Amino acid sequence: MTLLRTARIVAAIQATVMTVYFLVTNAVRADNPFFVPDLLLTVLLVVAASLPARWAVPALVFAFGLAAGVWTVSLSHYAVRGELVDGLDHLPLIGACVVQSLFLIRHLGRGPADPAGAPDRPEEALITTALTPDESTTA
């Protein structure tokens, strides 16, 4: 399974968890300060997971980052109220966001796949070319 496919599946699972949360609990109410951020991150996770590969990776990094931030603030809200145990269910969601973001950022940093044997950095190619004797000078 590819990295992008895994990230799409994680985003879909998290969006599903949030949808179930909206349907099962009393979260959809005017006095819930997390309703709009939770709804926004749910929609963003679905949209990012649905985009073509070229756009999906940066969109998923953003969506996972937003989700981790919202869920961390929510967890902190529980802690401040003295109800940290009730908010511990946020930890798997936050952890999955952080891990997926790190893998996707690492993937972004690699850039397009290089042909086999190509140097990692362009300056290595210049040095290798300069140090390799030319066939016309060795004869």
Image: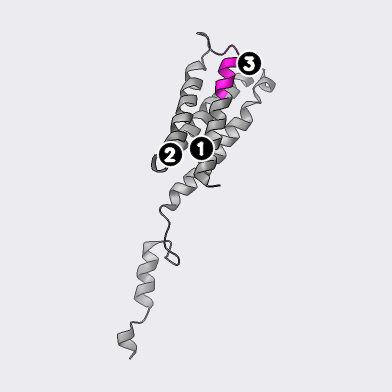
Q: CA distance from mark 2 to mark 1?
A: 8 Å
Q: Which residues are magenta?
A: 18-27
Q: Alpha-carbon neighbours of circle 3 within 10 Å: few (<14), some, or many (≥20)? A: few
User: Which residue matches tag 2?
Assistant: 56
Question: Which mark sits nearer the N-terminus, 2 or 1?
Answer: 1
Q: Which mark is residue 8?
A: 1
The amino acid beneath tag 1 is: Arg
Asked if the stretch drawn in magenta spans residue 24, the answer is yes
Residue mark closest to the camera, 1 vs 3: 1
Quarter of the image where the C terminus is located? bottom left
Compared to residue 136, the image places residue 41 above or below, namely above
Mark 1 is surrounded, within 10 Å at the Cα level, by few (under 14), some (14 to 19) or many (20 or more) other residues, namely many
Counting from the top left corner in percent of width and height, residue 30 is at: 50, 8
For label 3, the residue is 81
Image marks 2 and 1: residues in contact by CB distance under 8 Å: yes
- Tag 3: residue type? Arg
Nearer the camera: disc 2 or disc 3: 2
